[in-house]
Amino acid sequence: MTSISVSTTINGDDVEFLCNVDETLLDVLRNRLGLMGAKEGCGTGDCGACSTIMDGRVVCSCLVLGAETQGREVETIEGMSDGRELHPLQVKFIEHAALQCGICTPGFLMAAKALLAAHPDPSEEEIRFWLAGNLCRCTGYDKIVRAVQDAAAEMRGANA
Amino acid sequence: MRYENPTTIENAVDLLARSDGPAYVLAGGTDLLVRMKGDDFDAELVVDIKSIAGMDQIVETAEGFTIGAAVPCAALGEHGALVAAWPGVVEAANLIGSTQVQSRCTISGNLCNASPAADSVPAMVAANARARIVGPGGARMIDVADVPTAPGKTSLARDEIIEAISLPKPDARSGDAYLRFTPRTEMDIAVVGAAVNLTLDDEGIVQTARVVLGAVAPSVVVVDAAAAALVGNKLNDATLKAVEAACTAASNPIDDKRGTVEFRNQVAGVLGRRAAEIAYGRAGGTQ
């Protein structure tokens, strides 16, 4: 199988990699670039543990070919904090104990980041529908929803 | 397996035509990549159509809307004029999958995947949508209804690609709607889907109607008897009862763990009636 040369942007950095045709973005992130934050839960787009943001839209990186990222802008959980300064969503997930085992957390954070970029003041219903593609088997979701609401409020305040 | 991302549709068609093994068109990939991970998947070629100019565009023209084959469904819901013109088509498209899937999935892909339960297809068929198909001999337009022929099968030749879906400009007093039943509130596949598109005269009497069911037969079912019950009438109880009965009668579903035949037949009637009520309201009719 011939390798494909891909030039893309990940968390603001120019990145070049080689990948096989059937390698997904998730495979590339984890196995070639050492970015282990995105998790493989189902591998079929059902669980959201591999959520990343591509050109401003949250996607399941298991349903994107590595080759498709040519010329695009990819954001992963590794780029969420500003150095050691956590993103408000990360802070609120910790404060609200919106995680237990943590496998789903990077995906939830990326999906929630995309939500707040599009809808700075979402209703609880909007949050629950937006995050319906992210599965969590620990928290029962309620703490996650509260954390997102709290982070949204803080981010609105910071931007006011 | 090769990956190609041509920049013209002619080049894409040529790649498909010259392929000497199974070849697939890649738009959003939300169905194709899942299949690629299966043990029995075999492909010589994947043609990514997203580098082709215009594929990711929604264009509003005097005739209506042209939706490129690579436009993600999320973008349909963000297009104010399209939402205003065809709210039923957009709500059907936006029901597919999760937020993550919405970022990638397309109505052209939903059509070509040819699932009997595809949400956007009944709504597109009700809206008289047409598909622009490009092959080695050039382009042709066909009704969306004529694309899926059986579960997983389409009428397209192996070297043909849907370039865009066209929706007509809706009449002044018209409205469309799509409803589906799923056991969960989201992230689920339709057990029954029902789409209605109708136009009214100044008195609120239905002039034209299209009633289409999904997930209750191998392909979508256009329920002419339900449309006939609507045309010439206002949306009174008798009309709605006739619509419901016609939808139940036209329903021809399978029996599985997600719904029995009896259940699906009944729900087809209920959703057909409710979708008619929503479409009627959107058209400006008052019951």
Image (cartoon, rainbow, N blue to C red):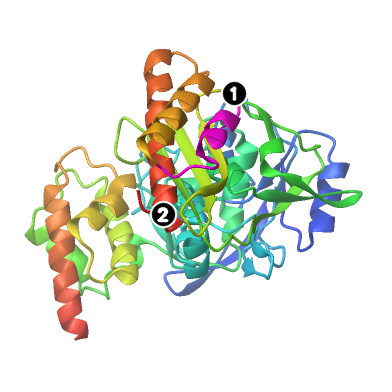
> Which image quadrant for residue A35?
bottom left
Residue under circle 2? B285
Left or right: B70 in relation to A52: right
Question: B61 or B169, which lies in front?
Answer: B169
Q: Residues within 10 Å of mark 1 (few under 14, many from 20)?
A: some
Q: Residue at x 19, y 69 (%)?
A: A152
Image mark 1: chain: B
Q: Is residue B4 magenta?
A: no
Going 26% across and 75% down the picture, which residue do you hit?
A83
SS state under label 2? loop
Where residue A6 appears, x then y in whole percent?
A: 62, 62
Which amino acid lies under the numbered mark 2 shown in the image of this protein?
Gly
**Do residues under tags 2 and 1 come within 8 Å of each other at their CB atoms?**
no
Task: Please say whether residue B222 is one of the residues in the magenta stretch.
Answer: yes
- Label 1, secondary structure: give it: loop
- Residue type at mark 1 is Pro
The earlier-in-sequence mark between 2 and 1 is 1
Residue to which mark 1 is pinned: B218
Residue B165: where, in percent of width, then height? 66, 53
Residue B157 vs A73, above or below: the answer is above
Q: Chain for mark 2?
A: B
Look at the image and tell me whether residue B189 can be seen.
Answer: no
Discs 2 and 1 lie in a common subunit: yes
| Label disc, if present, on residue A44 of the rendered structure | none
Q: Which residues are magenta?
A: B219-235
